[in-house]
Each structure stands twice: as structure tokens, then as C-alpha cells.
Image (spheres, helix red, strand yellow):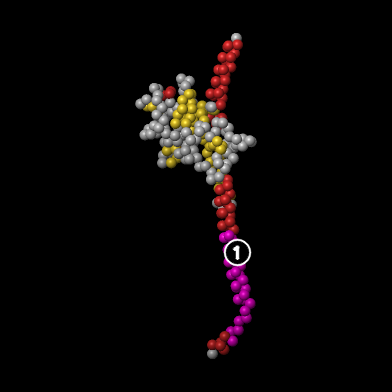
Amino acid sequence: MFTKVYFIACLLLIIYSVYGIDTLNKSDVLSIKVKKDKDGQCPPYSMGPYNDEDVCSFRFFCRDEVCYPVTNNSTNTVEFTNKSGQVETYNIDHWTESYESSKKACSNDSDCFSNKCKKGFCTLNENSELTQCMDSYSYQYKSSIFKFSYSVSMNCGKAAHVKCSSDDECASNNCVNGECNNDNYKPVGKTRAFLYGGIILAVFFLFVGLLIYLICRCCRGSSRNRGVPYYPDEKKKNLV
């Protein structure tokens, strides 16, 4: 009896470790709040915080509505469990026919995260339900002089290097030369944003101040001319 209970407990622990921590469904991913936790930390399934921002960076790759996180931005790899129950690591930045950097050996499609095995190696699959989810930025410019702001939220779409015809097809909202780009329009940072805003305001007020000064000077000059008496007869005498 104890052996059965121990076996079930271990099985539940394994399931929780694989699916409870390392995987999320797509709806859960889209509902992620990208801001840091109250303690200033980012969750373990994120890629960590941006340098001077209060938000965390996220990147997921989803297949069959199950999403796997990329937690190391330097390696750009994702771990997934194939249909055989094996955990595999896949290089997710090189899904192109011409450059199969990962060179993951496979014997059938189910061995690949892209669900396409070609000539013994995992490769790009344009027809698969493979989705990338990431934090994406959108900007709002209420006034080009006084205020600009941005918002950030999770967005899902085509992964990097997949063919596209418009920005909204891509997870990054960035379609470049017919191919999704990983650049998700990261903000310049609050410090630099305030700096740029301050410079713009300073130039604006300097221009207004200079304009007021010139107007006042012109008005003062015209008022002085009006105060000088004019004697036309005296001018004629001087001419004679």
C-alpha cells in the first residue's frame, strides 16, 4: 500500500513539474501581467527584467495550445516534451530552410517542435499550428510635444523567420521584408524618455520665450518712434 501511494505521489510530482511549472496554455499566457511582482522580481518562466523598466520579458512557443517558455535569452532555446515523453531542447531562432542551425536529428515529425522532420533533421513547418507569444509594445502619442506613452501586453502570432504579409500576423507585430522579426519595439526606457521629453519641452519654451522677446522689442521700438515730435516745416527749412 505504501509503495502505491509513494508511486502516485512521485507521478503527481513529475506531472506538476513538467506541466505545472514549465508549461502554460495560450489563454494563460495572454493573460500574463508583464509588470514585476510586488517584490520587484520576475516569475521563473520569464527571461528576466529589462534594464531600467518595471516590466519583465516573456517569450513562449506554443504547439497544440500548450506553451513552453524560453527562460534564457542568450541561448534562445526551448525545452518541450515530444509524444514519446522525451524532453528535447530546440533552437528556436533558426527556423529557416537554408540555415538549420539546431540540426536536431529526427526520425518522424513528432520528434520536432515544429512538427516537421525533413531529411533526418527538424526544420521549418509553414503549415503547423506553431505559435510564438511575447511581450509586445504599442505607443500612444497624444501630442508630439507634450506627451507620449506606451503600453505593453502579451501577444501571440507567427514566430521569427516565418513568412508574413502584415505586422499583425507576427507575435512581435513586426513584419520585415515578408518575414517576422523578433524586434518587439522595446521602449527607450523611462530615464531616456523623460530626458527626451525634457529636451523637447525646453526647446519649445525657448522658442516661445524668444518669440515673445522679439515681439516686445518690436513693440517698444515702435512706441519710441511715436514719442518723437515731427516738424515738417523745419524739415523743409533744412532742405533749403
- Residue type at mark 1 is Ile
How many neighbours does mark 1 have within 10 angstroms: few (below 14), some (14-19), or many (20 or more)? few
Nearest to the observer: residue 84 or residue 240: 84
Against 197, residue 238 (above or below) is below
Is 115 contained in the magenta span? Answer: no
On the image, the x and y values in percent for residue 230 come to 61, 81
On the image, the x and y values in percent for residue 170 come to 47, 37
Residue 141 in the figure: left or right of residue 175: right
Is 227 contained in the magenta span? Answer: yes
The structure residue drawn at horizontal position 53% and vertical position 23%, both measured from the top left corner, is 18
Point out the stretch of residues depicted in magenta.
206-234
Q: Is residue 97 visible?
A: yes
Quadrant (top left, top right, bottom left, bottom right) of the C terminus: bottom right
The structure residue drawn at horizontal position 43% and vertical position 23%, both measured from the top left corner, is 110
**Residue 43 image-quadrant placement:** top right
Residue 186 in the figure: left or right of residue 2: left
Return the residue at label 1: 212
